[in-house]
Image (spheres, rainbow, N blue to C red):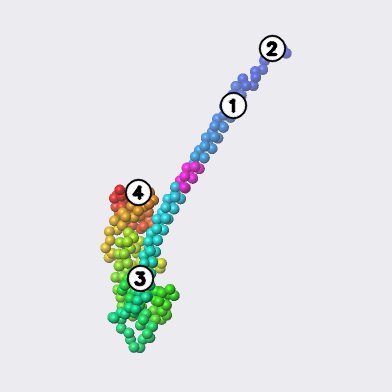
């Protein structure tokens, strides 16, 4: 080999080798960072979804508890109904007419009894009279009873509203919904509106009682409790009532 011929350097001493090596290292580190970020986001997302799921489950549990209380009230009412059915009660101010079938007059007496002692709605009494699990009167006799029963249904709706306000700490809108519900009291909208307009209840204190329940049983934050109190799918309190409740939480 000629002396003039240059001696070749090893490839790891060439400048381009180190440039390539640096590019490869940077690319690998960047990819690792991206993977780490992705895993972190996925973990955070999983935690968030878990928190949301747990919170929703707790809300459902509390709502189920409230539904159970309503069912208990209905069960208590059913017990009273059974007691009435077992009694041989006579209503003096319901006069039998000679030209009216005995069954019709019997239905009328029962209807008045339910109205006076159970504070039931007109539709609720009709269904009780005709039910296979109730009085089993014919539809004709039950209809005669309702057509001839002169009663203050708004007063009954008001008494029911007072019961829900005192025993269930319900909101005004929540009570209204229960009064008109086909699965509830079956009062007319006018009767229910009269009831909630005239019920004497401190709904701010009711909201506070509900807020304490959420705080104690579900460990919810004040903001979450406020949302639940005002939600149309929750307690349906007004914003002012919910604010009062949160302000007075311990």
Q: Name the residue rendered at 42%, 55% in the picture.
A: 61
* CA–CA distance in space, label 2 to label 3: 120 Å
Circles 2 and 1, Cβ within 8 Å, touching? The answer is: no
Q: Main secondary structure of the magenta part?
A: helix
**For the N terminus, which image quadrant?**
top right
Residue pushed farthest top? 3
* Disc on the earlier residue, 4 or 2: 2
Q: In x, y percent, where is residue 11?
A: 64, 21
* Disc on the earlier residue, 2 or 1: 2
Circles 2 and 3, Cβ within 8 Å, touching? The answer is: no
Q: Secondary structure at mark 1?
A: helix
Describe residue 7's horizontal placement relative to residue 179 as left or right: right
- Residue 223's place in the image compared with 197, above or below, is above
Q: Which mark is residue 69?
A: none
Task: Say few, some or many: other residues with alpha carbon within 10 Å of mark 3 (under 14 / 14 to 19 / 20 or more).
Answer: some
Q: Which mark is residue 222?
A: 4
Residue 136 appears anywhere in the view? yes
Q: Which mark is residue 21?
A: 1
* CA–CA distance in space, label 1 to label 4: 56 Å
210 or 229: nearer the viewer: 210
């Amino acid at each position: 080999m000629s002396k003039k011929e240059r001696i070749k350097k090893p490839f790891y001493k060439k400048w381009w080798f180190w440039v390539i090596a640096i590019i490869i290292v940077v690319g690998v580190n960047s990819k690792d960072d991206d993977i780490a970020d992705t895993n972190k986001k996925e973990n955070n997302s999983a935690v968030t979804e878990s928190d949301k799921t747990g919170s929703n489950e707790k809300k459902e549990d509390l709502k189920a508890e409230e539904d159970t209380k309503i069912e208990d009230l209905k069960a208590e009412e059913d017990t009273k109904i059974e007691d009435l059915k077992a009694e041989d009660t006579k209503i003096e101010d319901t006069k039998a007419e000679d030209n009216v079938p005995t069954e019709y007059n019997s239905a009328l007496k029962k209807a008045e009894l339910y109205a006076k002692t159970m504070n039931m709605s007109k539709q609720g009494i009709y269904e009780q009279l005709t039910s296979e699990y109730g009085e089993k009167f014919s539809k004709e006799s039950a209809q005669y009873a309702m057509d001839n029963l002169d009663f203050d249904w708004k007063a009954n709706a008001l008494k029911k509203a007072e019961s829900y306000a005192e025993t269930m700490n319900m909101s005004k809108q929540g009570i209204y919904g229960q009064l008109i519900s086909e699965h509830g009291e079956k009062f007319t909208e006018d009767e229910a509106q009269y009831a909630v307009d005239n019920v004497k209840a401190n709904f701010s204190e009711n909201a506070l009682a509900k807020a304490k329940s959420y705080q104690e049983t579900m460990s919810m934050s004040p903001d979450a409790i406020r949302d639940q109190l005002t939600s149309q799918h929750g307690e349906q309190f007004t914003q002012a009532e919910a604010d009062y409740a949160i302000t007075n939480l311990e």
